Amino acid sequence: MAKRETTKDKILNVAEALFAEHGFEQTSLRQITTEAEVNLASVNYHFGSKKALIQAVMARYLEVFMPALQRQFEQLALQPVINSRQVFDCFREPLRELTTVRKHGPTYFLSLLGFAYAEIQGHLRRYIMTHFGDVMQLLQTMMHRANPNLSPLDMFWRLHFVLGTLVFAQVSGRALREIAAADFGESVRADQIIDKLIPFVAGGVDAAVA
């Protein structure tokens, strides 16, 4: 017998779908409660606030993604010499593992990350640094090992340009896939965009300093 969906899970699932489609700012608690067929008291009881609900939605993915990413980084760290492409390749398997959260987990997660960055959700950044700061520090370490010629300031800009590219790829992903199909006859799934993205962002990070 299938496990019955709890009220808390129902709120999370509905909020996740709405956040991934419309963003955090454009999705109201009223939309979530209407879609989930619950009252506002239920949301307040289980989460306390919209920010806490956003963090809970992200936590379902981050608690799977971040430990998996840390394992990939720790394996890569054993290599005597590494490059940016190898660092970004570390993201592939952790993203695939998100299908254990939801069938289309990687797509949802990347969309949520895109909105978190585009809408400057500062509380999410604090949440991630508080709970997964060691993994983020490991990412910084791996990137500096791969690019010892880049100053911390150069690396700051380039990693944020990478994030900006990710945001564009997610927000415009459907349109890009439709254009690729119409103009080039290429059928691309949402989760396959990462395969096109990694070589591009790795090349950008590795570019010579002006």
Image (cartoon, rainbow, N blue to C red):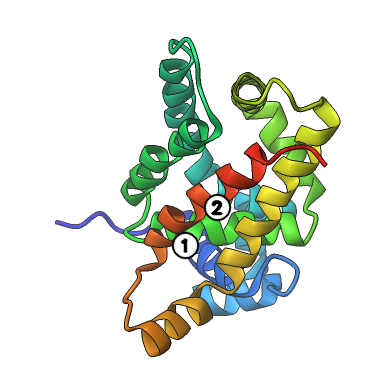
Left or right of 114? Residue 14 is: left
Name the residue at 74% across, 46% down.
Answer: 160
**Which kind of residue does numbered mark 1 sit on?**
Asn
Q: Residue 54 placed where, x, y %?
A: 65, 54
**Which kind of residue does numbered mark 2 sit on?**
Phe
Q: Is residue 6 above or below residue 26?
A: above
Which quadrant of the figure has residue 168?
Answer: bottom right
- Examine the rendering and report whether any part of residue 52 can be seen: no
Q: Is residue 80 above or below residue 10?
A: above
Q: Disc 1 designates what residue?
A: 13
Q: Quadrant of the N terminus?
A: bottom left
* For marks 2 and 1 on the same chain, the one whose residue lies earlier in the sequence: 1
Q: How many numbered marks, from 0 up?
A: 2
Q: Residue 80 placed where, x, y %?
A: 47, 9
- Examine the rendering and report whether any part of residue 201 can be seen: yes
Q: Quadrant of the C terminus?
A: top right
Front-most of 67 and 40? 67
Q: Is residue 63 above or below residue 140?
A: below
Which residue is the extreme one toward the left?
1
Secondary structure type for disc 2: helix
Q: Residue 59 placed where, x, y %?
A: 55, 42
Name the residue at 67% across, 41% down.
Answer: 207
Front-most of 48 and 23? 23
Which class describes the residues within 10 Å of circle 2: few (<14), some (14-19), or many (20+)? Answer: some
Name the residue at 53% across, 40% down.
Answer: 62
Instruction: Measure the alpha-carbon separation of dots 2 and 1.
Output: 33 Å
Which residue is the extreme one toward the bottom?
182
Q: Disc 2 designates what residue?
A: 200
User: Mark 2 against mark 1, which lies toward the viewer?
Assistant: 2
Secondary structure type for disc 1: helix
Q: Residue 156 placed where, x, y %?
A: 79, 36
Which class describes the residues within 10 Å of circle 1: few (<14), some (14-19), or many (20+)? Answer: some
